[in-house]
Amino acid sequence: MDRNAFFWQIQDGKLPQPRAAETLGMRITRMDPDEGVLEAEFEGKEAFLNPAGKIQGGFLSAMLDDTMGPALAALLNAGEFAPTLNLNVQFLAPAEQGKLEGHGRVVKRGGGICFLSGELTQQGRLVATATATAAIRKL
């Protein structure tokens, strides 16, 4: 764990939280770099609702990406970034306006390619799951 990496500079208040995370109302509640696990809360806002009154899937996908990506970002060195190459999302139940919980983990970290998984729950109910592939790049 490199405290000069982007993730830790944001957590230490040296860099601002990304605007996308702000939009999603993201708040990290647990980070375990040894396990490669991150837990976060998101605010499902009225602006995210579709005409049926449920949170639109693109916002749920962004929440999952913003759970899994930082789980990996916490393990990177300064000067590294890990863009998502592939994101696969499964929507299991409709999400309502309100708090959602994200659970992300690094499944396997290779030299340049990493595999991630995540879950999004609301009031204890599984709403969506995802897997992703990310590539570690030097800036």
Image: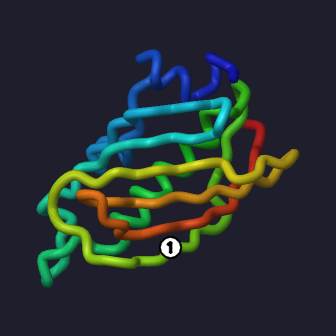
Residue 81 percent across, percent down from the top left = 67, 40
Query: Residue at (64%, 56%) from the top-left corner?
Result: 116
Which residue in the protein does label 1 denote?
89
Question: Is the C terminus in the top left, top right, bottom left or bottom right quadrant?
Answer: top right
- The amino acid beneath tag 1 is Val
Q: Quadrant of residue 18?
A: top left
Between 75 and 30, the one nearer to me in the picture: 30
52 left or right, relative to 63: left
Which residue appears farthest toward the bottom when viewing the image?
52
The colour scheme applied to this rendered structure is rainbow
Write the residue at 50% across / 73% down: 89
Screen quadrant of the N terminus:
top right
Q: Residue at x 28, y 73 (%)?
A: 56
Q: How many marks?
A: 1
- From this view, report whether residue 79 is shown above or below residue 100: above
Q: Is residue 11 left or right of residue 121?
A: right
Could you tell whether 91 is left or right of 118 in the image? left
Residue sitting at the far right = 111
- Between 80 and 37, the residue placed more toward the observer is 37
Q: Position of residue 93 (x, y in %)?
A: 31, 77
State the residue in front, 88 or 36. 36
Q: Quadrant of residue 26?
A: top left
Instruction: Give coordinates of residue 114: x percent, y percent.
Output: 75, 53
Mark 1: few, some, or many residues within 10 Å (few <14, many ≥20)? some
Q: Secondary structure at mark 1?
A: strand
The x and y percentages for residue 34 are 67, 30
Q: Residue at 87%, 45% (x, y): give it.
A: 111
